[in-house]
Image (cartoon, rainbow, N blue to C red):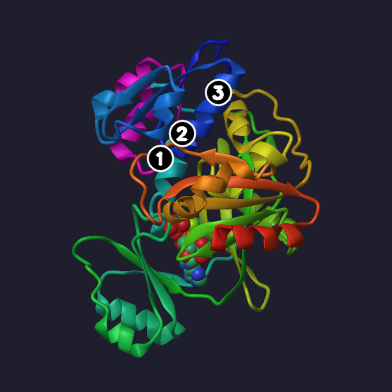
Amino acid sequence: MNSIRLGGTIGIIGGGQLGKMLAQSALRMGYRVAILDPSGDAPAKATCHTFIHAPFSDFDALKHLCEISDIVTYEFENIDAHILRTLVHDYNVPQGAETVLTLQNRDLEKTAIAESGADIVPYGKIEDGDALKGFVREHGLPVIVKTTTGGYDGKGQMVIESEAELAEMNIPFDEAEWVVEKYLHLEREVSLTTARSTSGQVIHFPLQENLHKNQILYRTIAPSRIDYEEEAKQAVGKIMEAMHFVGVFTVEFFIDQDGRLYVNEIAPRPHNSAHHTIESCSISQFDAHILALLDHPMPEVRQHQQAIMMNLLGDDLDRLEDTLFSQPDWHVHVYGKTGRKPARKMGHVTLLTDDVEATLGHLEQKFIKGV
Ligand code: ADP
Ligand code: MG
């Protein structure tokens, strides 16, 4: 049992939009919230009782967060291994250290997924240009090279399409560790968000269909128009047997043009593709995460209506700012980040609909043309 009293404090490492929406769930349920973030104007600074302004590498600051919290979770998964293990040992961090430490390293993550028996795209760890060329000889082009740690939203990734690009490619092997994988011509991307409580209750959200542009999530449709829910659940079942999850996590999948389903990666925290659950489901991914950590029973997920979620990147917001609130059916979330950049996630909108195709057409008009 992990229950804390109403008015107890939930500590969150990371105060971006995920930390903010987690905090909003915790606050609504009657808990206090403490947040640590390196940015003095983090979105979640406005949604907590105590804000600790410190880098994620500041061990003393993280210990302080744990000391003033009854239970601790994270929205930021790249916490140093030694710090995380110590916090888990000394304080109440129900998610533990081992799963997140595996998943913060693409090489360890892919090895663990492959060992679970779920399908993954062929990949290899590469230490130099010869290893990259060797992988290409074996698997062909195109390939995608990714940093082993620290990448998100396509950062630290390079697609190599041709022999000429391969010859010119200058990967900084001395600055980072790299993996390479076969670049698939994707039919679709889908994701399955699951929550598991400390005592083992599991709930699944509807399978989500995700469209990325420039390796950043552009749009999610839930439930997915392509039905792979059973296959995805089976893969997640295998992964859950191999790895110990507590709280909400999302498995991202690729579907190739032959209809094969591959696990891409796993996020052991709330996920952008499940933001629609705030409006579309009987329980949101953020509520589910808090309930799971505190070992309260979670209701079965019922989706009230089909949902479309569009991310608002900086340049979307530039186009849409003046009309954002003129759309009565848009559930608008703006995270409150200062510093708008063209490809930065500034917010999202969710629409509930009975006619996905018609709503998609209408949305594309608005998003692309801003009218
Ligand atoms: P991140 O940690 O940045 O989310 P991902 O590995 O999920 O990294 O890559 C981001 C996106 O880039 C994917 O959702 C997909 O659209 C595209 N992508 C990544 N790897 C591949 C691949 N092997 N084949 C095809 N597309 C890929
Ligand atoms: Mg991803």
Task: Estimate the spatial distance between the alpha carbons at disc 2 and disc 3, rounded to whole Å.
Answer: 10 Å
Identify the residue position indicated by label 2 in the image: 19
Whether residue 69 is in magenta: the answer is: yes
Label 2, residues with CA under 10 Å away: few <14, some 14-19, many ≥20: many
* Disc number placed over residue 26 in the picture, else none: 3
Disc 2 is placed on an element classified as helix
Q: Is residue 256 left or right of residue 36?
A: right
Give the residue drawn at x 73%, y 53%: 223
Who is closer to the viewer here, 48 or 90? 48
- Which residue position is annotated with label 1? 76
Q: Please, is residue 356 above or below residue 67 in the view?
A: below
Q: Of marks 1 and 3, which one's residue comes earlier in the chain?
A: 3
Q: Label 2, label 1: how many angstroms apart (C-alpha)?
A: 8 Å
For the C terminus, give its image quadrant: bottom right
Q: Nearer the viewer, mark 2 or mark 1?
A: 2
Rendered residue at 73%/64% (across/down):
226
Q: Amino acid at mark 3?
A: Ala
The image position of residue 196, as x and y in percent, is: 62, 36
- Dividing the picture into quarters, in which one does residue 34 lie? top left
Where does the image place residue 58, in percent across and percent down from the top left?
24, 31
Residue 111 shows in the view: no
Specify the quadrant that holds the N terminus. Answer: top right
Density class for disc 3 (Cα within 10 Å; few <14, some 14-19, many ≥20) is: many
What whole-number distance in Å separates the C-alpha atoms at marks 1 and 3?
17 Å
Give the residue type that dot 2 points to. Answer: Gly
Residue type, mark 1 in image:
Phe
Q: Is 195 located above or below residue 353 in the figure? A: above
Instruction: Judge by depth and name the residue closer to the eye, 355 or 69.
Output: 355
* Magenta stretch encompasses residue 334: no
Residue at 32% x, 65% y: name it. Answer: 178
- Whether label 3 lies within 8 Å of ligand 2 gets the answer no
